[in-house]
Image: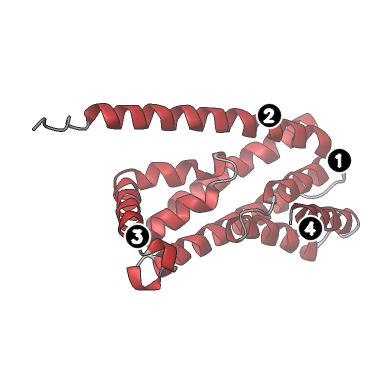
Amino acid sequence: MDDLLTSWVAAIRLWLEGHEGPLAYLVLALSAMLEYVVPPLPGDSIALFGVSLATTAGWSPWRVYLALNLGAIAGGQSAYYAGRYFGPRHRRPAFLRTERADAELERVSELFRKHGAMALAANRFVPAFRSVFFVGAGIAELPALAVLGWGALSAMLWNALLVGLGYALGATFGVLEQGMRIYAAVAVVVLVALAGVWMWRRRKQSPEPSSP
């Protein structure tokens, strides 16, 4: 599966090198969208390649920026409506209709009702788990317009950072990809640490079981 995805990304990059124009920007947008719909797809790879084309091959940075934003917004909303559709118990796969799954999904829903805006605003800055934020927002039945707004804000900030840094530095794809790998590794460590602190605080705040 990984080899297939890698080959697919390589083929898209090869095609993009010789096809600057409306169709190429559409391919960038679709790649950004599919990252949310097919999470194993390395959508950032295509996005970074688009940024590198703006910095080294004369592509319009504004059109690259617009394409990446539109794709991310469409992908996020697709994941959100998937969460809305599969939220009701009778529509879930069998393995999500157990008592334990019910309890976990309710916990996720409650978490999103309290902190959904913050999570959605940060989603583009969290590698690999972006679609999870929107699925969770759908399960929690957060308002569609709020999800759209916070998701769009996150996408615009993240893509402005990518395009702005890439364009200012004149960075090649290799440099951008290496920088993304370092960022992703650091982000995962930070996420694991934050999750550990949250679980520790939750356990500490839980009442001790009464002795018989």
Q: Amino acid at mark 2?
A: Ile
Residue 34 horizontal/vertical position (percent):
64, 60
Residue 172 in view of the camera: no
How crowded pointer 1 is (Cα within 10 Å; few <14, some 14-19, many 20+) is rated as some
Circle 3 or circle 4, nearest the eye: 4
Q: Nearer the viewer, residue 204 or 147?
A: 204
At mark 1, the secondary structure is helix
- CA distance separating discs 3 and 2: 35 Å
- Please identify the quadrant where the N terminus is shown: bottom right
Circle 4 or circle 2, nearest the eye: 4
Q: Earlier in the sequence, mark 3 or mark 2?
A: 3
Q: Earlier in the sequence, mark 4 or mark 2?
A: 4
- CA distance separating discs 4 and 1: 28 Å
Image side of residue 119 versus residue 58, left or right: left
Residue 94 horizontal/vertical position (percent):
42, 68
Residue highlighted by disc 1: 56
Residue highlighted by disc 4: 4
How crowded pointer 4 is (Cα within 10 Å; few <14, some 14-19, many 20+) is rated as few
Image side of residue 128 versus residue 134, left or right: right
Residue highlighted by disc 2: 182
Identified at 42% across, 29% down, the residue is 196
Q: Earlier in the sequence, mark 2 or mark 1?
A: 1
- CA distance separating discs 4 and 2: 24 Å
Q: Earlier in the sequence, mark 3 or mark 1?
A: 1
Q: Residue furthest bottom?
A: 90
